[in-house]
Amino acid sequence: MLGSDGMPSVGERRKSVLHRREAWEGRLCILPWLVGFVVFTAGPMLASAYFAFTKFDALSAPEWIGLGNFVDMVTKDDLFWVSLYNTAYYTSLSIPLYLLIALCAAMALNVRYPSVSIFRTVFYLPSITPSVASAILWLMIFQPDYGLLNTFLTWIHLPTRQWLFDPQVAKLVFVIMGIWGIGNFMVIFLAGLQSIPEHLYEAAAIDGAGWWARLRHVTLPMLSPIIFFNLVIGIIGSFQVFTAAYIITDGGPVNSTLFYVLYLWNNAFQFFEMGYASALAWVLFVVVLIFTFIQFKLANRWVYYEGDLRSLEGT
Amino acid sequence: MSRVMEPLVVQGDTEARPRPAGLGSYRPRIEPTAVLWFVVVCAFGVIALMPFLWMISTSMKLHGHEFDYPPQWIPHPVQWVNYSDGLTILPFALYFRNTLVITIASTIGAVLSASLVAFGFARLRFPERDALFAVLLATMMLPSVVTLIPTFVLFKALGWVNTFLPLVIPHFTGGAFNVFLIRQYYQTVPYDLDESARIDGAGTFAIWWNIMIPLSGPVLAAVAIFTALFSWNDFMGPLIYLTNPSLKTVSLGLQFFLGQYGAQWNQLMAVSVVMTAPVVLLFFFAQRYFIHGIVMTGMGGR
């Protein structure tokens, strides 16, 4: 972490003065971040931890109600469970699917074609398209009567669905829409693939390894830290899905797309139940924390770090 | 934790390196699997592009013919008037101006503050430095909704609701992701440069401004692009803080348009095209920095 700083060595006293000066200049440099951390991160986290135990409408002073919010959430609020289920459903279906497709796309692009950079652009563009614009676009494509998708399905004689109007499949539509935006995962996978040393593949080929063996014993182990990174970041992101649901369905039909953050947002800014919404936020935070912790624990079993002693013992 | 965020070896643009072999490409001659992959890639490329083409095509259709059967990919007649109608039915010129103001101010703030903070973390020594940097890395994993409500209460108390300040000022505090990105880069700049400048009598801040900033063009470009993109596309922030109609951003305007004139698909798509075009252009002209930035942070996993 520490670079090889080379300060000119003058007399000891002068040196300590210089060091003290450098320390203060360093603190001054990071001051913008430190202020931001206190004002926009640490302070709000403490405040929201406090609000979680209060009834608070952002107009009058918060009123302490102890564990009331959490008790209500677990015992009385069906929508809390519904939104938690919806989000868990979405996450558990979408993240594995997205990572798989992104990995396949990256492997396909890691081959020498003259036009790889064009494809890379094509696959990446959807993930930077403004979310409001893409939401409206999908609304049109999934339109049940004349939308492009149902027209296409009719044309190839497959059954059509009501899609966003059908509580059975509305969540699935969000999973499908998200496939369009996997460009970020893909670019990271692609960089990971390109940093795998060629000599590993050469050695594998000499040993007679075929396509599958090279994937299984070279590509996947070498890529596992990247897969892990995408998994952690992907899950944190997908727990917070909001904009598309807010614009396209606003939680409907029959709350089938009421995702967690959308429900939190409704509580905070529609019903002005800021205390309850803070409690919801903390529950989400703890859930994400537990998930991330479990993933880091499990990572020891399948993530391979180069230069790691454990992996030498393992093989 | 530290594993995922471990500093990484900075690489150039992924394409600039001599291309190492990947799956199914070990031998220089064309393998059947490579052909198969190519076909798969083409198919997916078409699927990925289709929504964009549909957006553009719909934006030029006559109203009432957006859902014609069979689907019309090349509109006839081409209705350019959708663009002028769509952009004037609501004051989109104003919305674009607002969005641009927020985007430019945020971008300047992010680049300046993040590069200064990164300079402090990368080049200056002080006892608390490594502990604070660990805190900074930890905040990258914090779900942003946890701080949403108190931040709103704070800005409300400050009287900043219905100003651009809540959307701009946080960017002046050197976001964790940006600082991480720039610090990685600064660590690759040789120390000889600082030293000779110090011998010439340059102060710490002169070194930052005159040496580090000019040398870090690519990484600052990456930070600028990510920030600009975030501000341009942001929906939740403006939704919370901008309720005054004259302060709306394009995102909010488009969403309001959908609510008011939901059936005007051709005009909705026209405005969407105008909103998306700058993003696409930015990507084409700055693709190197984009990929570089994603790769540098993503490769933190290695």
Image (cartoon, coloured by chain):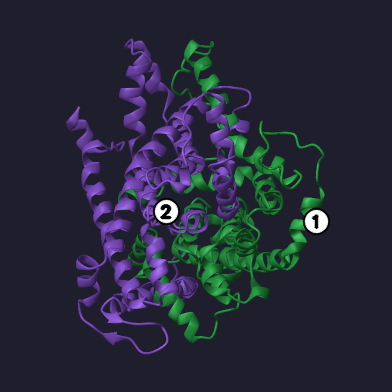
Chain colours: A purple, B green
B31 is higher (above) or lower (below) than B215: above
Residue B214: % across, % down: 64, 58
The relative height of residue A234 versus residue B37 in the rendered view (above or below) is below
Residue B97 location, quadrant? bottom right
Q: Which of marks 1 and 2 is in front?
A: 2
Q: Mark 1 lies on which chain?
A: B
| Same chain check for tags 1 and 2 | no
Q: Nearer the viewer, residue B126 or A161?
A: A161
Give above or below for A17 relative to A220: below
Task: Name the residue at 60% across, 78% down.
Answer: B163
Please report, as a chain letter, where disc 2 is located.
Answer: A
Q: Identify the residue under disc 2.
A: A253
- How far apart, in angstroms, are the residues tagged by discs 1 and 2? 35 Å
Residue A49 sits in quarter? bottom left
Which residue ends up furthest to the left in the rendered image?
A313
Crowding at mark 2 (Cα within 10 Å: few <14, some 14-19, many 20+) = some
Q: What residue type is labelled 2?
A: Pro
Give the side of residue A82 with respect to residue A30, left or right. Answer: left
Looking at the picture, tell me which residue is in the foreground, A124 or B185.
A124
- Disc 1: CA contacts within 10 A as few (<14), some (14-19) or many (>=20): few
SS assignment at label 2:
loop
Find disc 1 in the rendering and name its residue. B84
Look at 57% across and 49% down and name the residue there.
Answer: A134
Seen from the viewer's position, the closer of residues B183 and A44 is: A44
The amino acid sitting under disc 1 is Ser
For residue A218, which numbered disc appears in the image?
none
